[in-house]
Image (cartoon, rainbow, N blue to C red):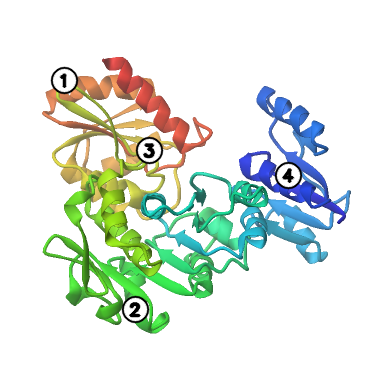
Amino acid sequence: MGKASVIGLGKSGVAAARLLQGDGWEVMISDRQTSESLCQQKAELAKEGIAVKLGHSMSLEDLPQLIVVSPGVPWDLPVLVDARSRGIETIGEMELAWRYLKSFPWVGITGTNGKTTTTALIAAIFQAAGLNAPACGNIGYAACELALEARSNHAPDWVIAELSSYQIESSASIAPKIGVWTTFTPDHLSRHKTLERYFEIKAHLLQQSEQQIFNGDDEYLSKLGANYWSPNACWTSVKGKDYIIGNPALGAYIEGGWVIVQGEPIVEVAALRMVGNHNQQNLLMAVATARLAGIDKEAIAQAIANFPGVPHRLEHICTWQGIDFINDSKATNYDAAQVGLSAIEGKAILIAGGEAKAGDDTSWLATIQTKAAAVLLIGSAAEQFAQRLEQIGYINYQILETMDKAVTKAAELAPQHKANIVLLSPACASFDQYPNFEQRGEDFRQHCLALK
């Protein structure tokens, strides 16, 4: 088979390496990081015949025939651009998984925000219907882990894949049976440079999909309208049948407290325990997906009623002295943080900050003025956010830098301001202080539970 290079020693990279090695490739994994746990992993993989280079940026000196890129690795790294110009096949881990799993039907979910909740809901519904339908990609398994399981006779009935723009960009041939687009707002512009490029990448997945579902309440997607997409696309709206773009008979909407798909009442909206208008949009897209896949109403109703929500997305951690502590660490941009803050009932002490991203903060700042009794700022964005709050005349903020100080101060301030909620909704990436948003959310959880 020849030589294959895998970039990144996360679970995606390891699964990709094992998949290739099982097909006779000579595999090398490279990772710029080095740590005790990575060294341990290197030793384990060496026993399987997979070489690992730590503290190493990949070069083309070994002349691999194939390069596989883990999801977080920039597609425009000079070494990858050089590899493609030399005709060396360069693909994402998700593309590699697709090559092994394309005989099974896929649901591909993309969007700026709402992907994870919608993906988790879809997987829960499919599983309630008795299907082997694991979630993978940005959630759950690495896609190549599923391919390894399929190889050992644990074949999926469906693959439910959450796909970031990074993963789509490096996986040109993925063609889901059902494609879902949740929202579209500026994000990842430091990587994709222009909004047009970011849009094109996501649009590619939907253009490759046999059936398409769009959030018709999204401002950007709805402006494009039905003319841009297939006339057979399913559009959704929480506002009712009159707001369905394209053919209402194909759409999904809310009417009389029920989710209606293609004219048929499927499940009561109240069955979903998650708060916020945006979660009703996610519910519509998930139920529409299930109906397109032929899943019956009973399985859908059962799954929705039992759905606990998604960790780090408006996740209730605890109630202390009548104050609810809510973890929205997954809100890594202004739009997601605005949605999180506007979804809560009452006034909040907001904890925000981290590694700032490019984007429009106008709506987020407006929501802070109406919903936040005080704002506690952490991380490298604290000074920048303080300046923005000053500019809009919002002075009830403090810079506290770290999570432990912020949680302690929030617990102190909430009773003073008669705020019923302490909300971590950072509007930032986590990489200034944490490896990922999950660890940031776990840190918040630990400090909240310590109050008790």
Q: State the SS at label 1.
A: loop
Q: State the SS at label 2.
A: helix
Name the residue beneath numbered marker 3.
Answer: 311
Can you say whether 27 is above or below 36 in the image? below
Q: Nearer the viewer, mark 4 or mark 1?
A: 4
Q: Amino acid at mark 2?
A: Gly
Q: Quadrant of the N terminus?
A: bottom right
Q: Are marks 2 and 1 in contact (CB under 8 Å)?
A: no
Q: Quadrant of the C terminus?
A: top left
Q: State the SS at label 3.
A: loop
Where's residue 98, x and y in %?
A: 62, 60
Name the residue beneath numbered marker 4.
Answer: 18
Measured in 3D between alpha carbons, the distance from the residue under mark 1 to the one under mark 3, in whole angstroms, is 23 Å
Q: Amino acid at mark 4?
A: Arg
Q: Quadrant of residue 373?
A: top left
Q: Is residue 333 left or right of residue 216?
A: right
Name the residue beneath numbered marker 1.
Answer: 321
Can you say whether 414 is above or below 126 in the image? above
Q: Residue at x 50, y 75 (%)?
A: 207
For mark 3, does the 10 Å Cα neighbourhood hold few (<14), some (14 to 19), or many (20 or more) residues? some
Q: State the SS at label 4.
A: helix
For mark 1, does the 10 Å Cα neighbourhood hold few (<14), some (14 to 19), or many (20 or more) residues? few
Name the residue beneath numbered marker 2.
Answer: 225
Marked residue nearer the N-terminal end (2 or 3) = 2
Q: Are marks 2 and 3 in contact (CB under 8 Å)?
A: no
Q: Nearer the viewer, residue 437 or 316?
A: 316
Can you say whether 353 is above or below 274 in the image? above
Where's residue 182, x and y in %?
A: 37, 61
Q: Amino acid at mark 1?
A: Gln
